[in-house]
Image (cartoon, coloured by chain):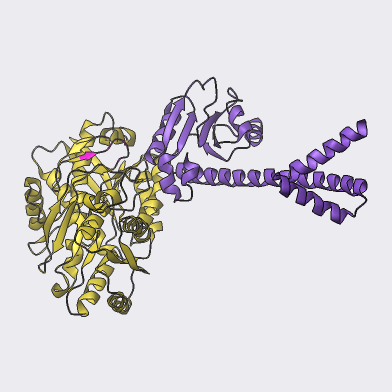
Chain colours: A yellow, B purple
């Protein structure tokens, strides 16, 4: 039987620990499922390190994994800063990064397999939905780094060309104190937008939602791309319900693959936890890796990359295809409305969308056709 | 052409940017062509290079190596497109060739997807700036030429009419206005007339 070492580079400490612990959990479920299956053709041996949410540490540890541990593929990174930190290592040694996160696009590295959505796949449906439900005055709030700024640039452009309006724009440093979010919530109330679009990530999400809930009155809707079951789980239950998230996966999806995934996940981590897109994507990417490894001609990163290009693989979110043009995946966009039990109701589902990381082919006017 | 769109954002303008690629369709050529398409450019590849230069390009990428020293020639002379050299050698002769082609940017082999977009952005903005500057130089040249002719014509008028140069200059402007012709044309016709009379 084949044995393959894989590098695992997710932070279980530091500001990204909530999100990246979820990535790690999904990966561990997939590794255990693979290794214990009677039909397993390859045993996976994960080399797990904690970069502590520090981009330089991701680079140092990635290099160690590639040069000392002899791994061809690393599963890791969530923020763009950490991914960019690892890219030179990949380029130098030809290794492969399975990157599981949604990000702002405008990148193509032949060494990265991008498992999350690009802005065209989920930002567009979210803004379309906001406009269609007459939420055209939007307050943008984000964690202060490239993801939020780039997503907001795209959102502003879309709103601008569709008759919507950005009524406020604000960035908070990662790891800001609760008081900063309370001040933001007050400011939001003063500008009185139809909805808040949040690109706040990680643990800070909890603080934003709680600060908005503390204001009382009719709940102001927060629309997000990165608030998942993992973030809802750590916030006060009273702050959870009624918000929108655009994503390609929600724990509540009723597919056979998702039922399998959820039962494995719950068996490992307990019934109180609903797996999020973070866990789902690493879970699916491990299966993609196994499938590609078995069909690869040789045991080297180049052969692995060749096998990944155009690969079809099953995932809890549905059947996946890696676009051979750009190493990103085709996905089905969905909108979820959060519940106070920490789950989401899927309120809308679209057709499969081709990844378009450089946003070359979308219509920027998103008003319903009749209004054009 | 993209130049009409450049007041809009650069990223949007990319979707109408016409790129001509003069490079063999090997690994480097293909990888550059794919990345250009990925970022939204319209790409036409030629190899061997076309007999007559392509005239509707916004950007021309050309292979710069010792075996093909002149690919850029038709484009570097006319300057209507941004020029980007694809280089594999950094030997002194090759570097000299790039200097002489007066390119707006270079990409190095082996081609890496990252860097293509920022090189294109800087080359296109440099080219735009160069175009603005040369338009300005052309205009200034015209102005300077007119001024020299006007001075000459003013002197002729002042001599013939026995008036001050100041009055002669005012007369020149008035006549040009009455005849609805440019100062340049007015001055030229006075100088020509003077030459004719002087010759007789």
Left or right: residue A67 compared with residue B58: left
In this view, A39 is above or below A21: above
Report the magenta stretch's main SS: loop
Is residue A123 on the magenta stretch? no
Left or right: residue A154 compared with residue B108: left
Query: Dividing the picture into quarters, in which one does residue A219 lie?
Result: bottom left
Residue for point 56% across, 40% down: B105
Of all residues, the one furthest to the front in this rendering is: B178
Is residue A326 on the magenta stretch? yes
Residue A230 image position (x, y, % from top left): 19, 63
Asked whether A293 or A202 is in front, the reply is A202
Residue A39, can we see it?
yes
Left or right: residue A119 compared with residue B148: left
Residue B198 image position (x, y, % from top left): 92, 34
Residue for point 24% across, 68% down: A194
Residue B94 image position (x, y, % from top left): 63, 31
Query: Dividing the picture into quarters, in which one does residue B167 lie?
Result: bottom right
In this view, B188 is above or below A262: above
Query: Dividing the picture into quarters, in which one does residue B80 lie?
Result: top right
Part of the protein shown in magenta: A321-327
Residue A172, can we see it?
no
Asked whether A51 or A141 is in front, the reply is A141
């Amino acid at each position: 039987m084949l044995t393959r070492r894989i590098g695992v580079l997710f932070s279980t400490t530091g500001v990204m620990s909530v999100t990246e612990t979820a990535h790690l959990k999904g990966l561990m479920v997939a590794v255990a499922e693979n290794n214990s299956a009677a039909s397993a053709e390859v045993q996976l041996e994960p080399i797990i390190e904690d970069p502590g949410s520090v981009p330089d540490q991701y680079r140092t540890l990635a290099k160690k994994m590639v040069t000392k541990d002899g791994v061809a593929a690393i599963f890791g990174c969530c923020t763009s800063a950490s991914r960019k930190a690892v890219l030179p290592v990949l380029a130098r040694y030809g290794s492969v990064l399975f990157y599981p996160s949604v990000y702002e696009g405008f990148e193509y590295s032949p060494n990265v397999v991008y498992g999350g959505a690009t802005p065209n796949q989920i930002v567009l449906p979210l803004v379309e939905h906001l406009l269609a439900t007459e939420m055209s005055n939007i307050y943008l709030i984000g964690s202060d780094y490239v993801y939020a700024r780039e997503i907001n640039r795209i959102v502003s452009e879309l709103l601008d060309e569709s008759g919507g309006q950005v009524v406020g724009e604000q960035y908070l440093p990662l790891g800001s104190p609760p008081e900063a979010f309370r001040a933001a919530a007050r400011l939001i109330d003063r500008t009185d937008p139809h909805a808040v679009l949040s690109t706040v990530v990680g643990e800070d999400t909890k603080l934003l939602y709680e600060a908005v809930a503390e204001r009382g009155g009719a709940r102001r809707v927060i629309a997000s791309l990165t608030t998942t079951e993992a973030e809802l789980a750590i916030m006060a239950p009273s702050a959870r319900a009624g918000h929108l998230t655009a994503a390609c996966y929600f724990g509540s999806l009723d597919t056979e693959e998702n039922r399998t995934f959820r039962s494995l996940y719950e068996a490992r981590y307990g019934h109180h936890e609903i797996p999020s897109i973070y866990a789902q994507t690493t879970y699916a990417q491990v299966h993609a890796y196994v499938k590609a490894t078995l069909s690869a001609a040789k045991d080297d990163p180049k052969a692995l990359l060749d096998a990944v290009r155009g690969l079809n693989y099953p995932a809890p979110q549905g059947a996946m295809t890696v676009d051979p043009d750009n190493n990103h995946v085709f996905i089905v966009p969905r909108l979820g409305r959060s519940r106070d039990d920490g789950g989401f109701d899927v309120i809308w589902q679209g057709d499969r969308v081709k990844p378009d990381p450089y946003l070359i082919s979308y219509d920027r006017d998103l008003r319903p056709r009749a209004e054009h | 052409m993209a130049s009409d769109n450049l007041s809009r954002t650069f990223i949007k303008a990319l979707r109408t940017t016409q790129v001509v690629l003069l490079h063999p369709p090997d690994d480097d050529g293909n990888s550059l062509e794919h990345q250009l398409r990925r970022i939204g450019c319209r790409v036409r590849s030629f190899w061997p290079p076309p007999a007559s230069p392509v005239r509707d390009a916004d950007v021309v990428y050309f292979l710069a190596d010792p075996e093909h020293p002149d690919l850029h020639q038709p484009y570097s002379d006319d300057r209507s497109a941004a020029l980007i050299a694809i280089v594999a050698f950094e030997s002194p002769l090759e570097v000299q060739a790039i200097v002489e082609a007066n390119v707006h940017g270079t990409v190095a082999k082996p081609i890496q997807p990252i860097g293509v977009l920022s090189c294109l952005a800087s080359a296109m903005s440099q080219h735009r700036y160069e175009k603005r500057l040369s338009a300005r130089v052309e205009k200034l040249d015209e102005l300077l030429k007119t001024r020299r002719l006007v001075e000459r014509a003013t002197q002729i008028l002042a001599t013939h009419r026995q008036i001050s140069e100041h009055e002669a200059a005012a007369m020149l402007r008035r006549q040009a206005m009455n005849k609805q012709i440019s100062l340049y044309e007015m001055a030229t016709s006075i100088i020509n007339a003077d030459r004719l009379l002087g010759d007789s």
